[in-house]
Image: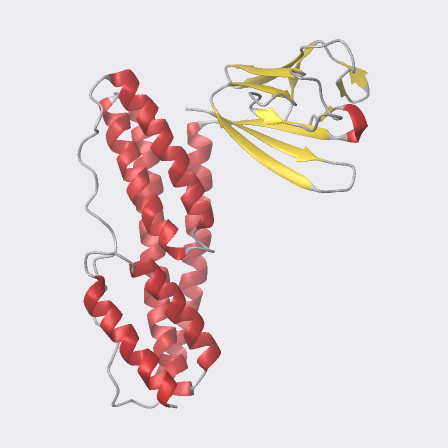
Amino acid sequence: MYTLRFLITRTNGTKETAAIDGKRAVIGHGAHCDVRLNLDEAAYEHVAIDCEGDEVFAAAMVAAPAVTVDGGAITRRALTPDDTLAFAGGVTVRVTLESEAAKAGNGGAAARRIGILAALTLVFVVFLLAKGRKSAAAEAPRELPQIFEAAATGCPQNAPDQAEALADERYALAEVRRERYPFVPHDGVAAVALYEQAAACFRAARDATSVTASDNAARSLRSAITLDVRARLLRLEYSARAHDLGLAAQDLQVLRSVVDGSVGGASFSSYLDDVQRRLQAK
């Protein structure tokens, strides 16, 4: 499974990104184009992008206005990751091809970053709690709630081609949810489930490489979220004791979002309600 990624830069400095699953795309202003530019920036169908192996090619679909790379008009040429396609009006487009292995690496890197930050927070909070006094108020639950659903064991589609298509869809959705996790915490939990659904369908499609990539992405993100929740729980206890209402409110919001709708979230929510009552009573 491959993804074409596009970075669009306009003359005022604004940047946009687009991601297309597959190894072919069309750039133009037509409503059907995979990457749409403005009417004054591109022809109806201006450039066709296709790939041979891991090499990306750009082919002009119209003679004028010309699309250039390094100042020279193109008909069809291979693109390096540093090449930019220059369109009318100064807009440029950079195209890169991302393989399944690279996706898994990027997912793992993002999860590792989350994990490192959570680990540092955990160490810091343990240090603060060690210095703090014991409180008679309710303590954080010793066991985390069951945040994640049981991993999918089967694919709704039996035919290999249909299973592959559904797996690609689930994986793409998981990537979007994972990117949103720092801003919408429950999306991280949803991303884990989507990666696991993708793995089940890739397994039905007999795509072993994609099964491994999906399983690894789910495992690393699950671990990172769990560590982040533990760190926030400890910090929440410290914030409540230190009467740091701002920090406590932030962690309460994140933790509620993470466990929202989870199987074991009821008792956990009761604990969070208790912390909130303690804060409001201060």
Whether residue 39 is visible here, answered yes or no, is: yes
Residue 67 location (% of width, % of height): 75, 18
Residue 232 location (% of width, % of height): 37, 68
Answer above or below: position of 59 versus 207: above
Q: What's the coloring here?
A: secondary structure
Q: Is residue 208 left or right of residue 31?
A: left
Residue 125 location (% of width, % of height): 40, 75
Q: Is residue 81 left or right of residue 62?
A: left
The total of numbered circles placed on residues is 0
Residue 159 location (% of width, % of height): 23, 17
Q: Quadrant of the N terminus?
A: top left
Quarter of image, res 132: bottom left
Residue at 52% across, 31% down = 19
Residue at 37% across, 75% down = 236
Whether residue 122 is visible here, answered yes or no, is: no
Q: Is residue 119 left or right of residue 14?
A: left
Answer above or below: position of 61 versus 13: above
Residue at 37% across, 84% down = 279
- Near-viewer residue (141 or 267): 267
- Near-viewer residue (221 or 271): 271
Residue at 29% across, 60% down = 259
Q: Quadrant of the C terminus?
A: bottom left
